[in-house]
Image: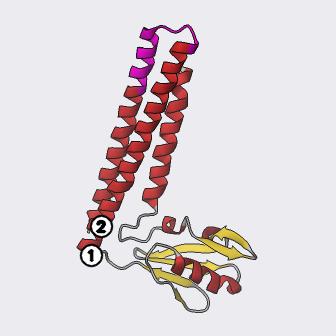
Amino acid sequence: MDDRIKEYDQKMQKTIDHLSSDFITIRAGRANPHVLDKIKVDYYGTPTPVQQVGNISIPDARMIQIQPWEKSLLKEIEKAIQTSDIGINPTNDGNVIRLVFPELTEERRKELVKEVKKKGEADKVAIRNIRRDGNDAFKKLSKAEDISEDEIKELSDELQKLTDKYIKQVDQMIDEKSKEILTV
């Protein structure tokens, strides 16, 4: 692969990685510790990920249990979860915090699928923007350096193939996540 194309390949891969991490945080009716990935707790004045202040376990398919290493953090963790956008109220028994995931209603599943498609579409746009930037850069190359139009066309074609590959990957990810959400 041409070095000039590699740069755009890496940018597109980062977009896919971002989408993947976004999809992990969308809950599909089962307890998934990754829903806590973006939640930060105030730990002695420093915003710290929940995973770094306690032990996270999944005692059954629809429950996450968080056991903080310091009891003083119970209230902080509870507050962080309540102010987050995961939509689950934590229960605190003085030792551990439990998050019980309710069964998703049909309506909620459809909303989540819409959210998945929206995120997927946004990432497709990002990939197409990367392609546009690449094509613009190639056109500038033809003016600045001694590169033939055929080479520019070749680079553009290669970039288009890359774009198609990543767009197809995004579509696949959307389909897989949608199926996961709609599976009862």
142 relative to 29, above or below: above
Judged by its main secondary structure, the magenta piece is helix
- For residue 45, what is the image quadrant? bottom right
Q: Quadrant of the C terminus?
A: bottom left
x and y percent of residue 151 in the render?
Answer: 46, 11
Magenta residues?
Answer: 144-159
x and y percent of residue 152 in the render?
Answer: 45, 15
The disc placed on residue 111 is 2
- The colour scheme applied to this rendered structure is secondary structure
Residue 147 is one of the magenta-drawn residues: yes
111 relative to 130, above or below: below
User: Which residue is under mark 1?
Assistant: 105
Which residue is pictured at 46% across the width and 63% down the height? 25
Q: What element carries label 1?
A: loop
Q: Is mark 2 on a helix, strand or loop?
A: helix
Residue 1 seen in this snapshot: no
